[in-house]
Amino acid sequence: AGLARVGDKDFMREVLTTMTNNSIPADKYTVQALVDGYLNSGDISGAVSLVQDMFNQHHILPPYTTHLKIVEFALGNDLVYEAKRQVYFLQQLWKWEPREGDAENFQRLMRMTQRNPKLSERSLKRLFAYFGEDLVDEDFF
């Protein structure tokens, strides 16, 4: 968490690599701390990519509040495209279906994420509106 506060994302990535090389599993709090570091250094695009990469490569998602934080940081910095990238990723999660071999705790996390009312289309539209931006039906697939 200390590295996240100062935004030392290079060292955080090095720690993640060391963890991976030493078979120390990352978890949702690892992703949350990494995202916080990226956001604190102003790298919103990197934060969006990091969440996507951690999900695609390791099947790990941060707490739902991290998704909202990314969208808020992006909109607060007038980076509407990055906010919509995160919304697009959330839509991919909404459409996720379990596969054979997916751990039960991962399936439960995915169901909770999919059903979270704060990550719903309606809530995301409200969040965009709060920042004076539009999130329209065409932004959803």
Image (cartoon, grey):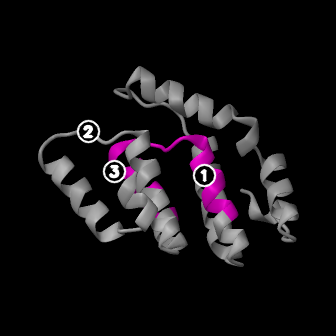
Q: Is residue 29 magenta?
A: no
Counting from the top left corner in percent of width and height, residue 79 is at 67, 77
Q: Quadrant of residue 136?
A: bottom right
Residue lying at 87% horizontally and 63% vertically, measured from the top left: 129
**Mark closer to the chain start, 2 or 1:** 2
Numbered mark located on residue 57 in the image = 3
Please give the residue where the numbered disc 1 appears in the rendered image.
67
Residue lying at 68% horizontally and 76% vertically, measured from the top left: 77
Q: CA distance from mark 2 to mark 1?
A: 21 Å
Q: CA distance from mark 1 to mark 3?
A: 18 Å
Task: Report the front residue among 13 and 87.
Answer: 13
Counting from the top left corner in percent of width and height, residue 68 is at 66, 52
Looking at the rendered image, the disc whose residue lies closer to the viewer, 3 or 2, is: 2
Counting from the top left corner in percent of width and height, residue 86 is at 61, 60
Q: CB atoms at circles 2 and 1 under 8 Å apart?
A: no
Q: Is residue 62 magenta?
A: yes
Looking at the rendered image, the disc whose residue lies closer to the viewer, 1 or 3, is: 1
Q: Which residues are magenta?
A: 48-72
Q: Amino acid at mark 3?
A: Gln
**Mark closer to the chain start, 3 or 2:** 2
User: Is label 3 in a helix, a strand or a loop?
Assistant: helix
Please give the residue where the numbered disc 2 appears in the rendered image.
25
Task: Report the front residue among 115 and 2.
Answer: 2
User: Is label 1 in a helix, a strand or a loop?
Assistant: helix
